[in-house]
Image: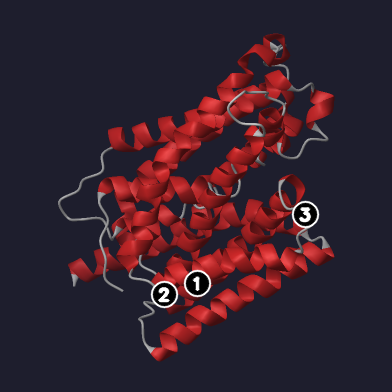
Amino acid sequence: MKFSLSKNQFFIFLFIVQTGSISIAFQTPIIKAAEQDAWIVFIVALLIQFFLLVLYERYYKHFVLNRFLKWVYSIYIMLILVIFVANIEKSLSVWVFQNTPPYVIVAIIVATSLYANLSKPESVVNLGVLLFPLFPLIFLFLFLATPDLIWTNLFPMGNISMKEWVYGLREANLAFVGTEMYLIYRGYLLNTEKIFMKTIGKYILFIGSCYLITVLFTIMFFSLAEIVIVPEPIVYILKSQEVQFIERLDLFFIIIWMTWSVVTVIYLVFTVLLLFNMKRTKKGIRSVVGIHLLLIIIPLIIIWKDLFKIGYEILMYGYFIFAFIVPFFVIIINAWRSKDAQKT
């Protein structure tokens, strides 16, 4: 599969994957864990993410996957996919399609991904570029809630225990699921494009600001007791806003978020196809169709058996394994082998 990415395409791709399905749900867990200090904990998690990407950039050439590791990463990405699709359906069934059967929503999401991934790679890559201009609208609408914010909800600060810090950092990392895509796609960047520490800093500042705003707004809009029972606080905040030009502001937001999430699904499926270099042959097309059949069946099982808690744990611990542990060992082993090859 031959294609290349510009620096802007690369970071837009990474941004969409990292914010895809999680952006409206991670606020509640981190605030439950760290209370008013959740935003401080998130800033620390953001700094960790920055240094992680800096290390990725420095050693990405040593991140070479053998066939076994490609299978391992593909299985992990498929797990992310089925959990994302199940969560997208759950959110849509609560806020928009209350009377629509789950299999209809899942089928529409998966059919969109199937159509996109049977197209040329360049068409898939450019989806994010076309979608990105819609993102600022989300924050434009969110800032309409500023008069309803209670700033004193941020206090007292700095009173959480070490245990709450640990749990808060663990929950904060849910916002960065998909970080490993940096290593997978870095080699497809155009040779003329260079990424410096300053570039990574700008990206972290942008995605961090977007996430941090949602955390701060959630803390200032709800009491701690209310946050426990509000799984998707950003949607609720928008739902409570009354504006003259749109009757249901939350529905407009959900449409943007749904489109964003579907593009995330498309990108993740594309990554699985990329790992195995699947071409548009009869065998390759059958594989693409097979992957999408799994994306219909397994999410429906998660929905019907209510396995969302298990899915949440998979995302949480999968992030640590595939963003930290596996890349560390792969890079160390390949760097050692490269050094030995140079000596001989």
Left or right relative to 302: residue 174: left
Spot the residue most to the left. Answer: 192
- In the rendering, which numbered label is found on residue 114? 1
Which of the 4 image quarters holds residue 221? top right
Specify few, some or many for label 2: CA neighbours under 10 Å numbering under 14, 14-19, or 20 or more: some
Residue named by callout 2: 118
Residue named by callout 3: 309
Cα distance in 3D space between marks 1 and 2: 6 Å
Placement of 100 over or under 234, stated as above or below? below
Q: Which amino acid lies under the numbered mark 2 shown in the image of this protein?
A: Leu
Q: Can residue 86 be seen in this view?
A: yes
Residue 78 screen position, x and y as percent: 57, 68
Cα distance in 3D space between marks 2 and 3: 33 Å
Q: Which amino acid lies under the numbered mark 3 shown in the image of this protein?
A: Lys
What secondary structure is marked by label 3?
A: helix
Spot the residue most to the bottom. Answer: 282
Is there a contact, CB below 8 Å, between mark 1 and mark 2? Answer: yes
Query: Which of labels 1 and 3 is toward the front?
Result: 1
